[in-house]
Amino acid sequence: MYQSFYKANFAYILLQSDKDKLINVDFTIYKPNFTKDNPPPVLEQALEELDLYFNKKLFAFNTPLALQGSEFEQKVYKALIKIPYGQTKTYQEIASFINHPKAFRAVGNTNSKNKLAIFIPCHRVVAKNHLGGYNGGLFIKEALLKLEGVL
């Protein structure tokens, strides 16, 4: 496994990959304790795309992703990737989109398992009357939605 990190204004973003695909994205307030020596091209691409995203110059990611999870979870992740930059969908809307209209709680549970935050934009999924939760912390979800002009 390879890893690198990106410093956003609200946290460090730890990125992990195999040789060809991004496999994990995580947030930490502490600087990761390793050097970024010769990352594989997939990590270089992810870092470059994050930089463009945070500078409002990239609106859809192209980094190859290793989707993990059950068939249902992968359907949810593929639906999340289709939510355009600067827009949100509710858990119910995602459930309906994947033809499981009563599975909105399962959609929320799947969001909480997302290992590829930002690249699979679970921050764009909200509850009907509030923001909902976010594994990285609600302040990160708010920061990402503010960046995209939603809040």
Image: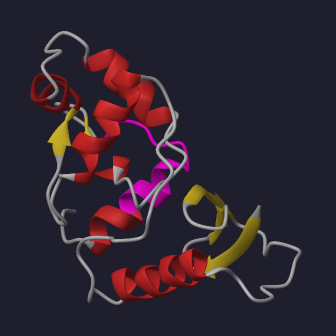
Q: Position of residue 141 (x, y in %)?
A: 41, 55
Residues drawn in magenta: 131-142
Image quarter of residue 76: top left
Furthest-right residue in this view? 33
Give left or right: position of 108 versus 20. left
Q: Is residue 114 magenta?
A: no
Q: Is residue 137 magenta?
A: yes
Instruction: Using the image as rendered, state which of residue 150 and residue 111 is in the foreground.
Output: 111
Give left or right: position of 121 versus 33. left
Image quarter of residue 145: bottom left
Q: Position of residue 64 (x, y in %)?
A: 44, 64
The residue depicted at 41 percent of the width and 82 percent of the height is: 49
The residue depicted at 81 percent of the width and 72 percent of the height is: 32
Relative to 135, residue 53 above or below: below
Q: Is residue 104 visible?
A: yes
Relative to 108, residue 111 above or below: below
Q: Position of residue 116 (x, y in %)?
A: 50, 53
Q: Quadrant of the N terminus?
A: bottom right
Colour mapping: secondary structure
The residue depicted at 54 percent of the width and 42 percent of the height is: 135
Furthest-top residue in this view? 102
